[in-house]
Amino acid sequence: MAWHVGIIAALVLVLGYVLLLHWQVVRRERVLAHSDGLTGVDNRRTFYEIAGREFERSRRYGHAFTLAFFDVDDFKEVNERFGPHAGDGILRLVAETTRRSIRVSDVLARLGSDEFALLLPETQTAAAHAVVEKLRAALRDASCDTALPLTISGGVVTCLQPAESLEHTIGSADRLLYDAKQAGRDKFAYEVVMPQPLEGFEPARFRRPHRLPPSFDAPLPPLSGPRR
């Protein structure tokens, strides 16, 4: 009888171990599905899902938030000159330095190549500038480890009231990033969506951003006729 109990206990232990291994595999797959494989930060899909929820929260409760896009200056040249291994190291350094420079509640994601995105909930204009300046200084310090100047340029949109759509906010951040890159290295361009008095408020036309993620690439509504 005692050996029966021993066998049952062994089977329970084996089953528990198998279930633990299965849970670890499932958990790892979920993490990989939501994160960038190279840097470990959120991936593009996860970022836009979180940004969508934050946009709706901002619309409902009237909370400010900031969305920023940035990329690494001269990354293509570094990749071509020193090889993809060096480029990957720079991307990991940028991701880790950025993660240490922001709050736990902030969201960092790699959108692709050397382009990153930041979502800063409950963040108004002055605080957004402070975050960007802290990050730029941290990256300049981190460049001592690479023996290469490490700077970023980007576009920052602060919504003191919700913009007409999340797609519009994304398009504005993308456009500002392009403007900053045109102005030179280590530059940031800013835009603020201000509250407007109701009697003077007239929604802007819905515009397609420069680049939209697949989940937002929906047909545009027909434009209204000319104003009279």
Image: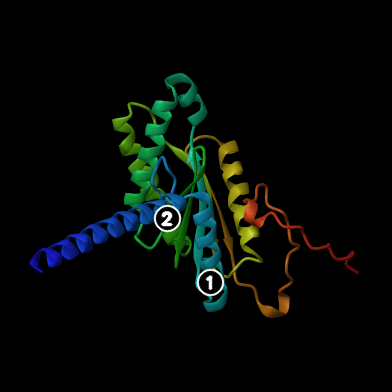
Q: Are marks 1 and 2 in contact (CB under 8 Å)?
A: no
Q: Position of residue 170 (x, y in %)?
A: 60, 55
Rendered image: mark on residue 30 = 2
Going 44% across and 68% down the picture, which residue do you hit?
122
Pick the front one: 26 or 132: 26
* Residue depicted at 10% across the width and 69% down the height: 1
Lower sequence index among marks 1 and 2: 2
Q: Is residue 74 visible?
A: no
Q: Position of residue 73 (x, y in %)?
A: 48, 34
Tell which residue pokes out farthest to the bottom in this image: 199
Between the residue at mark 1 and the residue at mark 2, the CA separation in whole angstroms equals 27 Å
Q: Is residue 172 left or right of residue 18?
A: right
From the image, tell me which residue sits under label 1: 58
Front tag of 1 and 2:
2
To which quarter of the image does residue 30 belong? bottom left
Residue 104 seen anywhere in this rendered image of the structure? yes
Q: What is the quadrant of the C terminus in the image?
A: bottom right
On the picture, is 162 further left or further right than 89? right
The residue lying toward the viewer, choosing from 57 and 74, is 57
Q: Residue furthest left?
A: 2
Label 1 crowd (10 A; few <14 / some 14-19 / many >=20)? many
Residue at x 38% of width, y 63% of height: 105
Query: In terms of depth relative to the viewer, which is nearer, 205 or 3?
Result: 3
How packed mark 2 is, by other alpha carbons closer than 10 Å (few <14, some 14-19, many 20 or more), is few
Image coords of residue 58 (percent x, y): 53, 71
Which amino acid is tagged 1? Ser
What amino acid is labelled 2 in the image?
A: Arg
